[in-house]
Image: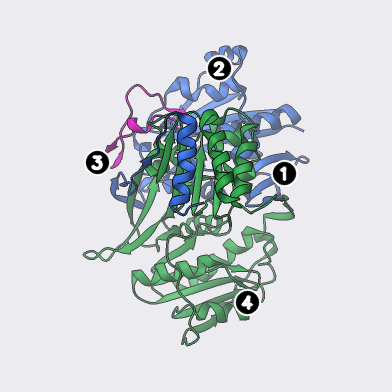
Chain colours: A green, B blue
Amino acid sequence: MVDVLALGETSGDGLDPITGELVAAARTLGGSVAVALLGDGLAAHGEQAAALGPDSVLLAESPALDGTSIDAYVTAFEQVCRSASPGAVLVGKTPLGQNVGPRTAFRLGAALAQDCTAVRRDGETGEVVASRPVYGGSATAEVAFTGDAPPFIVMRGRVCEPAEPSPSTDANIIRVDVEIAPSDIRARRVESVKQDIQGVRIEDASVIVAGGRGLGGPEPFERLREIADLLGGAVGASRAACDAGWIDHAAQIGLTGKAVAPDLYLTVGISGASQHMAGCSSAKNIVVINKDADANIFQEASYGVVGDWRKVLPAFIETVRELVT
Amino acid sequence: MAVDIIVCVKQVMDPEMPASAFRIDPDAKRAADAPGIPPVINGFDENAVEAALRIKDEVGGTITVLSVGGGHAMDVMKKPLSMGADALVLAQDDAFAELDARATARVLASAVRRIGRFDLILCGRQASDWDNAHVPLGLAEILGLPCLAVAQKIEVIDSSGVIVHSVTQDGYDVIEADMPALVTVSNELGEPRYPTLRGIMAAGRKTPEVWSADDLDIDPDMLEPGVRIVDLYAPESSRQVELVQGEDEADAGRNLAIRLREAGLI
């Protein structure tokens, strides 16, 4: 019996950063914290998770947990949850977590809140309350949970300061037996195709130059590429620009594209629909070039120019070139 | 080899409406209806309709569109029919207004069972109002179906198998499953087709099936929410924009670069 169970995630020989973030979020709820890890060969990962300071680490190991089928992870996590009987479950909004969390919750008859940016325990009632952006970020909902099953909370990445690893830990590392039958595996990955990325990876870029519907076609993205190259950054885009075929979907930033947090997010011709802002609102500085002074994106911006990009951009690029070279 | 497809769609508030038209009803703890702005079918659900039409174009079959709600705007809901879907089923009852994700999945599962035969269920990856991405996964769990999420391409390989290209951060995974299966569809699949005039006329002649909670043998307990909204409010923006001016637009562009340099951003 644990108070809060966090689904940790591995990345190669290490832990995915979401693991430390979930431990930190779990700590704010109070009580005992357990981290579950699902995989094959987790001894070293278990030590790393223990160093993050939970009360226990639950290791569920099976050859079926090799990353080829989400079904195996759902089956294993259901068994871990039944064995640990947690008071609440935290899962990351990651490719794995956003599938395993909801599906496991359904199997347990549990309620779930998606894409949460904060979680707390109500001072008076003691119930778990999660905050999440809805209507594409135009509103924030605070939700509580009903019923006897443990609430599942899917936490957005990079919203909590991660727990720091510490060499001194007294966390118990416990192996949990899980049984995954061949009939549990219903959908299976047979191939993984990686696209070639030119230049800086958009997720890692400290400068992103992004264009939207207002650019009107594919050619202006060449100008954005010039700025990105001058500043050592990457080119991004709104969903509208990607759907129009002006740039590859790999550049899509937003709720359903990539979530980015660069130091400088320079946008041209992006109105800032809230679904787009959900992908870039963690940027330290948003800079806007847009001809519509009422565009939503100005509300989130640090600096801006109200004007037609066709006139603003050439002089801007020229000046940037003089300043940085 | 023809396939029978059910596409689940949701009627939502138009996410493209001006931000100034968005209002929260603090008592009901929901977004207030925006007067004069008609609802739309969730964008990803239109991508799912498009995916179904492409499969039907390729191998033949039928497409049944299914929606759950307290009420539906009929001209909006008929759009998939005018794009080329065959039938429309509305699970519609006052008891179905404002359902949470878990209850919605339960009602959809009852309606799917009543529809009966199908090879594929297609859903949009998430809805633009609450962006839960929860209902399709729950529907697959309730019905015991393989679940293939976030497809940019769907290929029916023979009478019993489906292959999906599932969007990842840096490319895509090729996922295989037996049918019947549930697939969620993303915008990377491509733009939904426009209704044709012939399609619009054909859709006008079709009458949707409308099923109530009683028709679906829905017990009120099944609709109990698991999630309770404690509060709903507009977040405050903490940023104050500094608008950079100039003698003309080009000058403003020059001044912006200089200002960003002064601020240490470039």
Q: Mark 3: few, some, or many residues within 10 Å (few <14, many ≥20)?
A: few
| Nearer the observer, A89 or A227 | A227
Q: Position of residue A273 (x, y in %)?
A: 45, 37
Mark 4, residue position: A42
Q: Left or right of B105: which side holds A215?
A: right
SS at mark 2?
helix
Q: Indicate which disc, 3 or 1, sits on the residue closer to the N terminus.
A: 3
Q: What amino acid type is highlighted by mark number 4?
A: Leu
What is the distance, in whole Å, between disc 4 and disc 1 at their CAs? 33 Å
* Chain designation of label 3: B
* Distance Cα–Cα, label 2 vs label 3: 38 Å
Measured as percent of width and height from the top left, residue B140 is found at 56, 48
Q: Nearer the viewer, residue B73 or B5?
A: B73
Q: State which region is magenta.
A: B16-42
Which residue matches tag 3?
A: B26
> Quick check: A121 left or right of A295?
left
Which residue carries the number 2 mark?
A: B203
